[in-house]
Amino acid sequence: QVQLVESGGGSVQPGGSLGLSCAASRRISSFSAMGWHRQVPGKERELVAVFTDSGSTNYADSVKGRFTISKDNDKNTVNLQMNSLKAEDTAVYYCYGSRYTVGGIRNNYWGQGTQVTVSS
């Protein structure tokens, strides 16, 4: 069973920084894509940052220049460094990963989510 476990959420003032980490129960190199999404109540879950199937990184326009996604193959973690945080970054952040089966079926996996609150 594939598990993704987030850590590092919390509360911070506007302009502050937080780092999130996602620990995977499988080698992260076995995932075709991994990244972070976020969701606020009443809205759809949105992509924040991701390592794509092709190996590139994509960021939501709203976080470009402020957030950085990285991965640590030795620790099997995907991390999100969030700087210059704004109130509108407040959300539950979810780690995401996708893997293909031997038969070519793509399976998507989600962590349980971690709350990030930006408030003065």
Image (tube, rainbow, N blue to C red):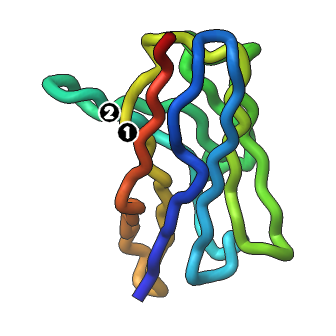
Q: Is residue 116 above or below residue 102?
A: above
Q: Is residue 19 above or below residue 40?
A: below
- Asked whether disc 2 touches disc 1, contact meaning CB atoms under 8 Å apart, the reply is yes
Does residue 118 appear left or right of residue 54 in this picture? left
- Mark 1: which amino acid? Val
Q: Position of residue 13 (x, y in %)?
A: 59, 17
Numbered badge on residue 92 = 1
Of the 4 image quadrants, the one containing the N terminus is bottom left
Q: Quadrant of residue 16?
A: top right
Q: Position of residue 33 (x, y in %)?
A: 58, 55
Mark 2–mark 1 Cα distance, whole angstroms, equals 5 Å
- Mark 2: which amino acid? Gln
Q: Residues within 10 Å of mark 2 (few under 14, many from 20)?
A: some
Does residue 12 appear left or right of residue 74 in this picture? left
Q: Residue drawn 55% across and 11% down? A: 86
**Residue that carries the numbered disc 2 in the rendered image:** 39
Q: Position of residue 87 (x, y in %)?
A: 47, 11
Q: Position of residue 101 (x, y in %)?
A: 44, 81
Q: Residue drawn 28% across and 28% down? A: 40
Numbered badge on residue 81 = none
Q: Quadrant of residue 27?
A: bottom right
| Dot 2 or dot 1, earlier in sequence | 2
Q: Residue drawn 45% across and 81% down? A: 2
